[in-house]
Amino acid sequence: MKKFSYILVVGFIIAAVNVNPQKLIAQKYASKVVCSLIGGMNNKNTNVDLALKEPNNSSKNKKSYDVSLGGGFIILDMGVNIVDGNGPDLVVHESGASYTGASSEPFYVKGSSDMKPGSWVFLGEYSGDKTTIDLKNFGANNIRYIAIFDMTYKPNDNSETPGADIDAVVALNYKK
């Protein structure tokens, strides 16, 4: 009997080792930029692909790993449908105070299942490094596309990182 139990444990460990955690994790983060309009005369953070995948900003090396919207917007395809679950369903990482020491810039978020006119749901106005959104507060479900709009437009802003700095968008409750 001990031998049989041992074989089951070994079989379970082998099965667990064969799971690819990167494949599972990649499903949760924004996977594609659908469209964007990035502003700012001297904006150094215009690479919209930096809003994809896991949060990766760091103040330790003083490098930027986000996109500064500069009064503009970005629409992201999450690659999965975000659904209303227990607690927050979505997190937007804006690189503000905890990364740079600067204040977080305000932005607002909309979500849609298909990007058709009239399908966009307002998901709130925010300002903060790690903003959590609960879809039940907005009567929303099955959100695949996330639009983030910067609320700090200043036509003469010559900052190198103007407006909301989006590092990542993460789906916490989702289905394929």
Image: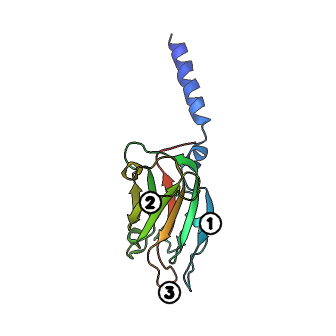
Identified at 36% across, 52% down, the residue is 137
Q: Nearer the viewer, mark 2 or mark 3?
A: 2
Q: Which residue is mark 1?
A: 35
Q: Secondary structure at mark 1?
A: strand
In-image side of 97 versus 65 (left or right): left
Identified at 53% across, 19% down, the residue is 6
> Marks 1 and 2, how far apart in space?
18 Å
- Circle 1: residue type: Cys
Identified at 49% across, 54% down, the residue is 170
Of 95 and 57, the residue lying toward us:
95
Task: Give the image location of residue 5, x and y in percent.
Answer: 51, 16
Image: 176 above or below 31: above
Task: Give the image location of residue 51, x and y in percent.
Answer: 55, 64
- Of the numbered discs in the image, which one, if any, rests on residue 20? none
User: Within 10 Å of the Cα at label 2, are there few (<14), some (14-19), or many (20+) other Cα atoms?
Assistant: some
Q: Which residue is mark 2?
A: 122
Of 81 and 29, the residue lying toward us:
81
Of 37 and 90, the residue lying toward us:
37
- Circle 2: residue type: Phe
Quadrant of the rendering where the C terminus is positioned: top right
Figure quadrant of residue 129: bottom left
Q: Secondary structure at mark 3?
A: loop
Query: Which comes before the other along the chain, label 1 or label 3?
Result: 1
Task: Give the image location of residue 171, x and y in percent.
Answer: 49, 51
In-image side of 115 versus 172 (left or right): right
